[in-house]
């Protein structure tokens, strides 16, 4: 099994894989995500057609070329909401947890002050994930809503990937100036 080491930010070129990921979910899984009896036709029309990876924050963990786990982070006015899906064959192995943590980190890196989830009361794994990450969880109009207050990780508007890239550039500059990596002992 070839597992990408960590969650990556998905781009336009991943749209086909995102559709393939959603097509592998059961009707019950789609209902957990979209809160209506969704079919792949309605998901294509109401979700995929409007998806814009340049604007929407999509994180994925790839295994053997498939997106095994997918997170969509909706960000509005410094508040994020995250939705997660893991393909049935990869569940209960910690991928949901890994992607949930990456989503929380990304929301912090974007300067969000809060991250939320909303799910159905019978979604035990999602509720377990929210509780174990310190979310305040309660009933909200028949669903379960969870919220976590966040401290910013990086200047507002800068994604974690941008921060990593800036650190890489800085390390490269250091190496060219001093001939060693910043943390190397000489
Ligand atoms: C929710 C979902 C993303 C979890 O993914 P996963 O990879 O199986 O999750 P993990 O293996 O990382 O486990 C996460 C937590 O759920 C718990 N869990 C996993 N499966 C469970 C189950 N069937 N019943 C109860 N708890 C369960 C784990 O013990 C773990 O709890 P912890 O954080 O307290 O240790 C996955 O079940 C899924 O895709 N469901 C369908 C779509 C969905 O409901 N998305 C959420 C919409 S908001």
Image (cartoon, grey):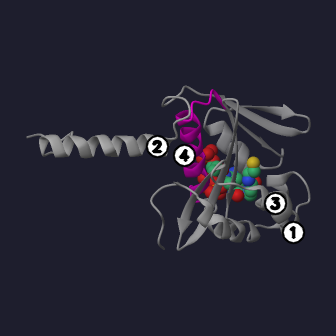
Residue 98 x/y as whole percent: 55, 50
Residue occupying the point 91% across, 39% down: 142
Which mark sits nearer the N-terminus, 2 or 4? 4
**What separation in Å lies between label 1 and label 3 (alpha carbons)?**
12 Å
- Magenta segment: 93-114
Whether residues under marks 3 and 2 lie with C-beta atoms below 8 angstroms apart, the answer is no
**What separation in Å lies between label 1 and label 2 (alpha carbons)?**
35 Å
Instruction: Give the farthest residue toward the left.
Output: 186
On-image quarter of the C terminus: top left
Residue occupying the point 32% across, 44% down: 169
> How many discs mark residues in the rendered view?
4
> Quick check: can you spot residue 41?
yes
Residue occupying the point 66% across, 47% down: 55
> To which quarter of the image does residue 157 belong?
top right
Does the beta carbon at disc 2 come under 8 Å from ligand 1?
A: no
- The residue indicated by pointer 1 is 41
**What separation in Å lies between label 2 and label 4 (alpha carbons)?**
14 Å
**10 Å crowding of disc 4: few (<14), some (14-19), many (20+):** some
**From the viewer's perspective, is 127 left or right of 96?**
right
Viewer-proximal residue, 87 or 93?
87
- The residue indicated by pointer 4 is 102
**10 Å crowding of disc 2: few (<14), some (14-19), many (20+):** some
Residue 114 x/y as whole percent: 66, 29
- The residue indicated by pointer 3 is 30
Which mark sits nearer the N-terminus, 1 or 4? 1
* Residue 143 on the magenta segment: no
> To which quarter of the image does residue 166 belong?
top left
**What separation in Å lies between label 3 and label 4 (alpha carbons)?**
22 Å
Residue 38 x/y as whole percent: 88, 61
Frontmost of labels 3 and 2 is 2
Which mark sits nearer the N-terminus, 3 or 2? 3
Frontmost of labels 2 and 4 is 2
């Amino acid at each position: 099994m070839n597992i990408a080491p960590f969650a990556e930010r998905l781009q336009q070129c991943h749209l086909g894989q995102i559709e393939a990921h959603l097509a592998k979910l059961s009707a019950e899984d789609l209902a957990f995500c979209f809160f209506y009896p969704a079919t792949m036709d309605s998901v294509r029309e109401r979700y995929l057609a409007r998806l814009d990876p340049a604007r929407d924050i999509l994180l994925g963990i790839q295994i053997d070329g498939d997106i095994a786990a997918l997170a969509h982070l909706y960000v509005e006015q410094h508040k994020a909401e995250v939705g997660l899906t893991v393909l049935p064959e990869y569940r209960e192995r910690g991928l949901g947890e890994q992607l949930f943590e990456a989503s929380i980190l990304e929301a912090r890196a974007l300067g969000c002050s809060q991250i939320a989830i909303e799910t159905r009361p019978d979604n035990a794994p999602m509720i377990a994930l929210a509780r174990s990450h310190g979310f305040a969880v309660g009933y909200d109009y028949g669903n379960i809503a969870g919220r976590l207050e966040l401290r910013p990780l990086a200047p507002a508007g800068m994604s974690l990937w941008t921060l990593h890239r800036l650190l890489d550039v800085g390390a490269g500059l250091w190496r060219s100036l001093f001939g060693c990596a910043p943390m190397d002992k000489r």
